[in-house]
Image: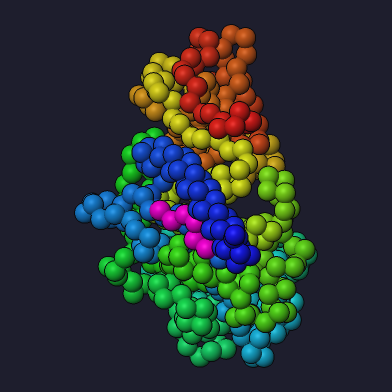
Amino acid sequence: MLTRVMIASISLAFCVNQAWAQDRQAGERIDAYLKPYVSSGNFSGAVLIKRHGRVVFERSHGFADREHRIPNTTATRFHIASASMQFTAAAVLRLVDEGSLSLETHVGEFVPGIAGAEKITVRDLLAERSGLPDINDRADYDEILRHHQTPASLVAAIEGSSLLFEPGSKFLHEEHSAYNLLALIVEKKTGVPFAAAVDHLVFRPARLRASGVDDDSTHGAAKMAYGYEPEGVKGLKRAAEIQWSAKTGNASVYTTTGDEAAWMDELFAGHLLSASSREAVLATSERIGYGWFKGASKRFSETTYYMNGRSPGFASFVLYLPREQTSIVVFSNIYSSATTTIGNDIAAIVLGLPYETFHPSDPAPSPSELKTCEATFKFGPDFYQPNAEITLLANEAELSLRWPSAAISPLIPVGRDHFVDRSYWEHVKIGRDGKGHAIVLDYGSFRGSAIHTEQGAFPDCCPFRAGRHTSSGVS
């Protein structure tokens, strides 16, 4: 006769084996999902999934150093771009918890000469509602990236400029300068360089041993990935090197997927921050702040916390689902926003929800077919670049999108008159009239109308094979 203890043991073993089987099946689907991204040169990096405190999936793909064929591993350290803001925010909140700083402190206490110094609070900076002009918008920003910087020099670059709006009144765009200023405040309050301060306030107490702030001293350091960027529709090239100190506070952190997942455990369920500081991060009604986006997700039927980022050669995406106690971390050393799509789709796979796979068209459209796609389209005032005119240009076997700045985005063909912008990972679709003329261009959720064509009469639509599928039959 089976005892209660034996029955409980058997039941527990059954549940554990069932969970492992489910994890294995999900892992196989994730591997299959990632394969076309990796083989087409649109993902190189590492992925980690943690559920209920347990790592259920961890993989690395591609090369940390393509020239020397050094592969990425689960221990590879990646620059994580704007996802760095969560660590800057945590350092500031640690100072708040210690009582050496207040969320209502005005920045005039640290930088009296900056516009709005008497109005902007530390809370406004953390919530990206300061109204400060953005350093990334400066005409000489590329030059700034080429030289070693400090928080003081970055803040000095916007001194004398007017506010864009009344502090605290709204969120306009990602405020890189606000986080440069937060880094300066951390330095002034601790008396040590920002990199050392974050190490002392956040990385060490959270036991993030592979993480750090890049102050330009990490070149050639062990297990650091080099960054790459798209070259045409299929190629990759080494990204231009920058001085990461020029992104201090807003995009200068490097870490591993394992450290990032451990940090998410600490932030959402740990004790490094006080209850009030954690409440400031998690319970605020604002859509963005403290290094995170937050909001109700229709896809996942719950409030989600996420952040993405891109800096030269790198892209990152992190997602936390509180009800599911699930963390998704996707780091890449390719400059492409594919990481956001990958991370959300992987979460859907884990939860058994619909997701789409990615497959470039095979065969690819011919040069003559691509030539029929050439035209210039005008978008409205609500577009990413208001009233922008965007041109599709065919060059041999590739189609590209030219922005008003003359920047070029290669377009990956995935279906009939259907492409993916390789840089920003937005869907691009061409609409034609009855004669085959390209008359509209859908870029994500925006639509532009043709104002000029590069050719005369068009033949019927580009007749290449559809290449995007839906795993569940639901698009």
Horizontally, is 351 left or right of 205 in the view?
right
- Predominant SS along the magenta part: strand
Q: In the image as oriented, which residue stretches furthest toward the left?
A: 68
User: Magenta residues, as a range?
Assistant: 54-59
Say above or below: 243 vs 341. below
Magenta region includes residue 194: no
Q: Residue furthest front?
A: 1
Q: Is residue 247 left or right of residue 99?
A: left
Residue 242 in view in this figure: no
Q: Nearer the viewer, residue 78 or 457?
A: 78
Q: Is residue 265 above or below residue 322?
A: below
Horizontally, residue 389 falls left or right of residue 203, namely: right
Residue 189, x across and y down, in percent: 57, 89
Q: Quadrant of residue 321?
A: bottom right
Q: Residue at x 72, y 73 (%)?
A: 280
Above or below, 102 relative to 68: below
Q: Is residue 56 visible?
A: yes
Residue 204 in the image, given as x and y percentages of width and height = 47, 82
Which residue sits at x=53%, y=22%? 417
Specify the quadrant that holds the C terminus. Answer: top right
Q: Position of residue 171 (x, y in %)?
A: 71, 60
In this orientation, which residue lies closer to the viewer: 33 or 150? 33
Q: Residue at x 73, y 79 (%)?
A: 276
Figure check: 392 above or below 126: above
Nearest the viewer among 452 and 37 is 37
Q: What residue lies at 63% left-to-right and 65% top-to-bottom? A: 4
Q: Position of residue 368 (x, y in %)?
A: 40, 15
